[in-house]
Image: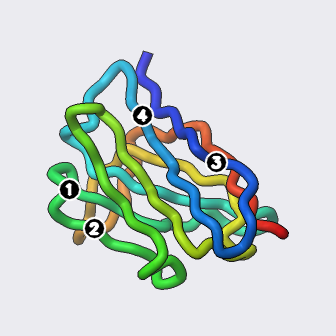
Amino acid sequence: QLQLVESGGGLVQPGGSLRLSCAASGFTLDYYAIGWFRQAPGKEREGVSCISSSGGRTNYADSVKGRFTISRDNAKNTVYLQMNSLKPEDTAIYYCAATQTVQNMCLIVHYWGQGTQVTVSS
């Protein structure tokens, strides 16, 4: 069974940090660019970050630049999202996706994970 499984979400205070993981089973992530997306209550899903299959290219939404870092370990078949200086507006369900890029953006989604909740609150 082909699966992407996110982990690492939780409740954190403003200014805190979390590291999300996206692990694949049933297939290898090597051939895919991986995107992190998020959806807050009442809002549309938005792209947060994207990393190329080799890990050589990354991009970020303006709202998270300088605070979030995406990385991948293809040997572990896992992609990470390090989130620092978290703000209440970062509260959302975070999803990873195995994608195909268009102009270096993770736009064509082949597989979605089930999501992990991140809540930033004091």
Comes first in the chain, label 3 or label 2:
3
Image coords of residue 50 (percent x, y): 35, 62
Q: State the CA–CA distance, disc 4 to disc 3.
A: 14 Å
Mark 2: amino acid: Thr
Secondary structure under the numbered disc 4 in the rendered image: strand
Q: Nearer the viewer, residue 48 or 76?
A: 76
Mark linked to residue 55: 1
Q: Nearer the viewer, residue 6 or 103?
A: 6
- Kindly indicate whether the residue at mark 1 contacts the one at mark 4 (C-beta within 8 angstroms): no
- Kindly indicate whether the residue at mark 1 contacts the one at mark 2 (C-beta within 8 angstroms): yes
Q: Is residue 35 left or right of residue 75?
A: right
Q: Residues within 10 Å of mark 2 (few under 14, many from 20)?
A: some
Q: Is residue 115 left or right of residue 24?
A: right
Mark 1: amino acid: Gly
The answer to which image quadrant residue 120 occupies is: bottom right
Q: Residues within 10 Å of mark 4 (few under 14, many from 20)?
A: many
Q: Which residue in the structure is indicated by mark 2?
A: 58
Q: Which residue in the structure is indicated by mark 4?
A: 23
Instruction: Please name the residue shown 55% across and 49% down the image.
Output: 95
- Kindly indicate whether the residue at mark 4 contacts the one at mark 2 (C-beta within 8 angstroms): no
Outermost residue on the right side: it is: 122
Instruction: Please name the residue shown 34% across and 49% down the image.
Output: 99
Q: Is residue 108 above or below residue 25?
A: below
Secondary structure under the numbered disc 1 in the rendered image: loop
Mark 4: amino acid: Ala
Q: Nearer the viewer, residue 68 or 108?
A: 68
Comes first in the chain, label 2 or label 4:
4
Q: Which residue in the structure is indicated by mark 3?
A: 9
Image coords of residue 41 (percent x, y): 79, 63
Image coords of residue 79 (percent x, y): 36, 46
Secondary structure under the numbered disc 3 in the rendered image: loop
